[in-house]
Amino acid sequence: MSESAELDLVWSEKDALLFFLNQVRDAVVQVSAGLTAEQERAAGVPSGTSLLGLVRHLTGAEVLWFQRIFRGEDRTVDLSMAVPADATRDEVVAAYRQACGRSDEIVRACPDLAMLARTANAGEDERVSLRAIVVHMIEETARHAGQADILREQIDGATGL
């Protein structure tokens, strides 16, 4: 399935969910393209959120939900939006793409999206299905893509990226 393909109603559930997840993943990355290092790191709101910080946060969310929670892997997860001073956009985006690729591999390898995660999310009692994790990540990533759009518009007026 190509990334530019239109929704095909005969796709499998996995293909459809991953298509839309990858659409919003790409949106988060694309919205920060073409900016200076200073602009990528600029806090656009009082909480300190920056475009590059959103990508870094989403990298942690991918690792948390797919590797740590669903697979039960012993992984250190950093959900902060703080970007190390020496980290470049290319490095942050590459780490995100790597985490997303691993997440996609996990989804594709799972025989049934109803399979429950090996562990529950911290503070929750129930384990959730892989289906719920993928849908949650679509929601989480789309929410941050919307924030990224607003941050970019504040930086240089660009919209519709």
Image: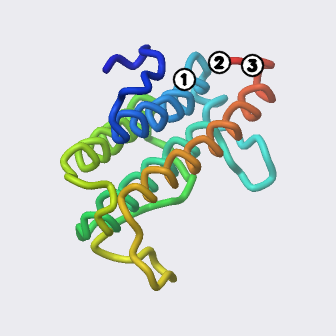
Task: Residue under label 1, please give it.
Answer: 30
Q: Is residue 149 left or right of residue 130?
A: right
Mark 1 touches mark 2? (CB < 8 Å) = yes
Looking at the image, which residue is at 44% across and 26% down? 9
| Label 3 environment density (alpha carbons within 10 Å; few <14, some 14–19, many ≥20) | few
- Residue 60 visible somewhere in the drawing: no
Q: Is residue 91 left or right of residue 135?
A: left
- Coordinates of residue 123 in the picture (x, y in percent): 51, 83
Say what amino acid the circle numbered 2 marks.
Answer: Leu
Quarter of the image with the C terminus is top right
Q: Is residue 65 left or right of residue 75?
A: right
| Label 2 environment density (alpha carbons within 10 Å; few <14, some 14–19, many ≥20) | few
Q: Is residue 76 left or right of residue 136?
A: left
Mark 3 touches mark 2? (CB < 8 Å) = yes
State the residue in front, 44 or 113: 113
Say what amino acid the circle numbered 3 marks.
Answer: Thr
- Coordinates of residue 53 in the picture (x, y in percent): 57, 45
- Check the image and report above or below for 94 versus 3: below
Task: Residue under label 3, please give it.
Answer: 159
- Check the image and report above or below for 155 versus 41: above
Say what amino acid the circle numbered 1 marks.
Answer: Gln
Task: Check residue 114 in the rendering and tell me which mark sits there, or answer none.
Answer: none
State the residue in front, 35 or 27: 27
Q: Earlier in the sequence, mark 3 or mark 1?
A: 1
